Image (cartoon, rainbow, N blue to C red):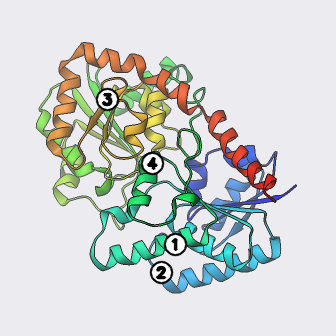
Amino acid sequence: MKKLVRITTVPLSLEKLLENQLGYMKNHYEVTAVSSEEERLKNFGENQGVRTFEAGLTRKITPLQDLKALWQLYRFFKKEQPFIVHSHTPKAGTVGMLAAKLAGVPNRLHTVAGLPLLETDGNKRRLLNLVEKITYASATKVYPNSNGLKEIILEEKFCKPGKLQVIGKGSSNGIDTEYFAHHAVSEEQKAKLIAELGIKSDDFVFIFVGRIVADKGINELVKAFLKLQHKNCKLLLVGPFEKELDPLLPETEKAIETNENIITAGYQNDVRSYFAISDCLVFPSYREGFPNVVMQAGAMGVPSIVSDINGCNEIIAEGVNGIIIRPKSTNAIFEAMLRLLEDVHLYSHLKQNAREMIVDRYQQALVWEAILNEYRSLENNV
């Protein structure tokens, strides 16, 4: 069996972005998961039945630590001699692809699931552009996980068109539409959660799921919600705050803490019951690759309001299973939310189409099979 190494900066990405995919791939390859945070990584490996290797990767700009991680990975690849090294997330991509190239790994694959550099400028932007080019130059193939992302990479001239390929219809992992289904959450579970969160039976619940940070559009979302001034309306925020990396404005934090109609649930390992008690996902992110959250909501029968950015505007079709709005606009979020509150016919139409569109295009088995077929095509090229 040929060796396959999958690498992410932190184990959370293995758990969420690639949920259960490595367990599927182990039937076809000898799989090793590489990431940081040894204990959590070890637990992931045991859960998926794959080997693990801990490397000192960080999400920040840490040159000395990065060089150390590069050396660790180079030695590991030299020893293991994998057939494929497949990286995800920016830091794991740069360090992993460079180490794999230096170690002579024949197939060096990198999936791009978003470009954080798009929200930077000046010297930091120039540095991140250079790092991105190093990643792509070190890889043998680059997989943007949406067509919009592919176009951005070409516009920025990060690599030659011949290296780029979108697998299937996009997405890094697809969606398990039996797991993410309204029938997977019982009426008792819903009633218990509604009571816990203090939601009334006639409340319209807008939900956001993801990191509670500025570049997910949370400042604008909270401001738009406060502008609604609708009695029977709640905003449910599900996810961790990351105050060090991308903090919210002080006035946003204050509104979240003090407004009784804004509910925070923190990080949740299983978000299905939160979707099941919600009416609409609002996902006003500034940048994405191919957001799992929007697919999860759709599979749960929840329509979405999303930014007109790559990935989001491929999962959502305007007026069919959701509403697409211009990014970074409080007013656009406000108008879309108000529209769904007031137009019952439109809301019903979007909700009716939400699940079917995800099942037809992003069922997990289809995505996993497409990735496996891509790996097999590399074997045929030997």
Picture coordinates of residue 192 (x, y %)? 44, 26
Badge 2 vs badge 1, beta-carbon distance below 8 Å:
yes
* Amino acid under disc 2: Thr
Q: From the image, tell me which residue sits under label 2.
A: 62
Cα–Cα span, label 2 and label 1: 7 Å
Amino acid, disc 4: Tyr
Q: Residue furthest right?
A: 1
Residue at 14% x, 28% y: name it. Answer: 230
- Number of dots carrying numbers: 4
> Which one is earlier in the sequence, the residue at label 4 or at label 1?
1
Say which element carries label 4.
Answer: loop
Find disc 1 in the rendering and name its residue: 58
In front here: 205 or 304? 304
Please give left or right for residue 31 compared with residue 344 in the image: right
Point out the tag, 1 or 3, that comes first from the N-terminus. Answer: 1
Distance in Å between CA atoms under marks 3 and 2: 41 Å
Name the residue that disc number 4 marks: 267
* Mark 2 and mark 4: Cα distance apart in space: 26 Å
Closer to the chain start, of discs 3 and 4, is 4
Q: Quadrant of residue 251?
A: bottom left
Query: Residue 258: x, y in percent?
Result: 19, 46
Q: CA distance from mark 3 to mark 4?
A: 29 Å
Contact flag, marks 1 and 3 (Cβ < 8 Å): no
Instruction: Please identify, in this view, whether the residue under mark 2 or under mark 4 is nearer the observer.
Output: 2
Residue positioned most to the top = 345
Quarter of the rendering containing residue 100: bottom right
Question: In screen coordinates, is 303 left or right of 180?
Answer: left
Q: Please tell me whether mark 3 sits on a helix, a strand or a loop.
A: loop
